[in-house]
Amino acid sequence: MATREDLTRSLNETIERIGLVRGRLDLASDQREVADLERRSGEPGYWDNQDVAQTEMRRLGELKSTVETWDRITRSSDDLTVLLEMSEEEPELLEELETELNAIRDQLDALELQSALDGPHDGSNAILVIHSGEGGIDAQDWASMLARMYLRWGDRRGFKTDLLDSTDGEEAGVKNATIEVKGANAYGLLKGEGGSHRLVRISPFDSAHRRHTAFALVEVIPEIENDTEIDLKPDDVRVDTYRSSGAGGQHVNKTDSAVRLTHLPTGIVVTCQNERSQTQNRETAYKILRSRLLELKLKAEAEERSELKGNLTAAGFGSRIRSYVIHPYTQVTDHRTEASVGDAQAVLDGGLDPFIDAYLHFLITPEEVAS
């Protein structure tokens, strides 16, 4: 058990940290938004637009949870100050003080991560687009391994995941894959995954068993929940249909169920073939296209505001962000945050949380990571 002096120092540090985190979260703004949402939810006709109402109610629930957590933390820190004073005459209270102090720290950790999820689209669903890069067949196999990793991570976290589209590789793996991850803060959690991922291993496709390096690019896009954010004109989109090679049961290669959209002003191409009908594929493809156009808009706005933070933000647009080494040793290392895990297979099985948490902490305190 820690000494009274240690606990006094820890409590003072925790109280100081509470003030810092509270300032970053802007709780006064959250409380005003809670009051506004509660007022609007009682207005006549509020539930006429179910999609908007449900989105706002989810937001209300998240905000109220944050405010209530802070109320508990504030009360607990006050109680611990009193407990510390009492422990001078009752040393047996130190054990209770240490337990409660650790609980507050855990709550602060969670709230700090939450403060990195305050972007306008962080609460949205996410669309991951994975492209094989340099490395030939190994790169296509690597793209498939990454798709599996993200699907497993989503399952672990309780998200709903769906493989929307994929193009098979020449001998193995995939040339590209599109995955939808649905759930609260899916985009906010995954936004740091955008960039180039490098794999180093003994190639299973090399008869000489030599070491190969392969690359794959991951794009992370917030999914648009309504059509008003992006003005998509019908004349700007060319729609092509073709025979699906993915899901579709008896209809595979018998009907033109797959859809390809080309946005003429930007040249962005979106395909979808894994839904069961052309109508579903078309709806999903349009959803992805709107989301990609939003990503383009957000990138332009961020560059205009000059808010890009060195190689951290550049990584989101294509630079190498992480290396996965399977031979001659096993190690996964993030080149932005320096987070590292020795069990590469555990990461590839969906154990991404150490890297996601490190990235979110980097967003909060980049100077600490850089030092």
Image (cartoon, grey):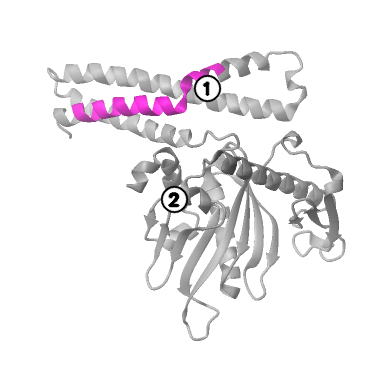
Q: Main secondary structure of the magenta part?
A: helix
Q: How many marks?
A: 2
Q: Amino acid at mark 2?
A: Phe
Asked whether, in this view, residue 115 is left or right of residue 224, the answer is left
Circle 2 residue:
355
Looking at the image, which residue is at 66% across and 71% down?
Answer: 169
- Give the distance between the C-alpha atoms of the residues marked 1 and 2, in whole angstroms: 28 Å
Q: What residue range appears in magenta? A: 8-32
Q: Is residue 307 left or right of residue 81?
A: right
Does residue 304 lie above or below 103 as drawn? below
Residue at image point 52% right, 22% down: 64
Q: Position of residue 320 (x, y in %)?
A: 50, 59
Which of 323 and 365 lies nearest the eye of the viewer? 365
Q: Which residue is mark 1?
A: 64
Q: Quadrant of residue 346?
A: bottom left
Determine whether the residue tagged by mark 1 lies in a helix, strand or loop: helix
Give the SS element for disc 2: helix
Amino acid under label 1? Lys
Decide which of tag 1 and tag 2 comes sooner along the chain: 1
Q: In this rendering, would 126 be left or right of 114?
A: right
**Does residue 101 lie above or below 202 as drawn?**
above
Is the residue marked by circle 2 packed among few (<14), some (14-19), or many (20+) residues within 10 Å? many
Query: How many residues crowd mark 1 within 10 Å: few (<14), some (14–19), many (20+)?
Result: some
Q: Is residue 162 magenta?
A: no
Please state the horizontal and vertical placement of residue 285, each as a whole percent of the image.
76, 50
Q: Residue furthest bottom?
A: 208
- Asked if the stretch drawn in magenta spans residue 29, the answer is yes
